[in-house]
Amino acid sequence: MTTTDWLLLSVLFLVFAYSVVVTAVLVKYRRHRLNRLVYRQRIRAKSKSGSSTNQHNQHVADEALKLSQAFQKFVPQQFIDHITKTGSGHIELGYADEQDVAILFCDIRGFTGLSEKMRPQELMGFLNSYFLRMNKPIHENGGFIDKFIGDAMMALFDHPGGTPQDKAIDAINAAMELRKTLDFYNIRRKRKGFIPINVGVGIHYGPVVMGTVGSDDRMDTTVIGDSVNIACRLEALAPKYGADIIVSAQVLEGMGDKFPIKTRLLDWVRVKGRKAPIQIYEVLSHLPHEQQEERFSVQSKIAAGLACRIDKEWDLAIAHFEAALAIFPQDSLAKHHIDVCRIYQNMLLPDDWDGALNIQ
């Protein structure tokens, strides 16, 4: 082979070797790129899978929250806190817990006659409109509505970690705010051509049993006890005594002397279902100043007349009540006590009579 042939052969070999090297580099580069693409796809797949799992978990959490919020509309969270405070985390049938609370009952006066004039849908619309407004004063003063009973509502004031004074003051403040709310509601009703409504409020302080009753497939929460019965009876007495808010002596004792509230003694009564009598008072602080002064002006005469009634000193008792009537002629309370004394004066009373008026 000539020198030229060797030179040509060397060039061809170099070209071939270069091609092999370049091809190898390109293959390696493409393989590396492919591996990176596969890796990215796997990361994306995992990301999508993780995102899907997170979305599923978030959906479950959202549904649980919605269920909890819906459940609280039927059973107040404060009630749940009481019956799960042992830390068990679930509600069991038959659970019971005794608490000292202030109990408030509020009822629409003359509701039966009012409801008879409404169609069913109108009646439900009215009640929902009413309860929507009356709910706020309860919650803003630390209470919660335990149940709605027709046109009435029952609220509890437990003030967790608070004193009897805290609970009593919360209930009194709520009652006075209820009256203010009712005034604004009646203004709105008047503008729409509806007649105004009135309510009676009764408050008592004492022990109650909060728990669960029912069966395996149907359970309900409940609050029972003598204190509940008393609060309910006091609310029913509101129209009888011409009072907006009636409270028991136990409420005033729990509230203490430092809280600025004006009241007057109404009567010494024994409510149905209870043996021991209680003193009941009318709250005056929410009334216009002139009405407060008028009602409070006869306070000493009413108290003196009641003391005489307890001792069966009928003529002297009537004299005190008539003196009260002379001071405030429009006061239905004095008239009520005069009528009671005249009835008892002609009755044969038992030896152990304690002067309490039996309220059915």
Image (cartoon, grey):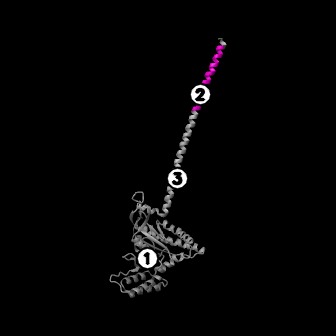
Disc 3 residue crowd, few under 14, some 14–19, many 20+, Cα 10 Å: few
Disc 1 residue type? Tyr
Counting residues from the start of the chain, the first of labels 1 and 2 encountered is: 2
Q: Nearer the viewer, mark 2 or mark 3?
A: 3
Q: Nearer the viewer, residue 137 or 74?
A: 74
Which residue matches tag 1? Answer: 281
Which residue matches tag 2? Answer: 25
Whole-angstrom CA distance, mark 3 to mark 1, is: 54 Å
Give the magenta range: 5-31
Which residue matches tag 3? Answer: 59
Quarter residue 355 falls in: bottom left
Query: Mark 3–mark 1 contact, CB under 8 Å?
Result: no
Residue at image location 52% in from the left, 51% down from the top: 58
Q: Secondary structure at mark 2?
A: helix
Residue at image location 65% in from the left, 15% down from the top: 7
Q: Nearer the viewer, residue 187 or 196?
A: 196
Is residue 256 visible to us here?
A: no
Disc 2 residue type? Val
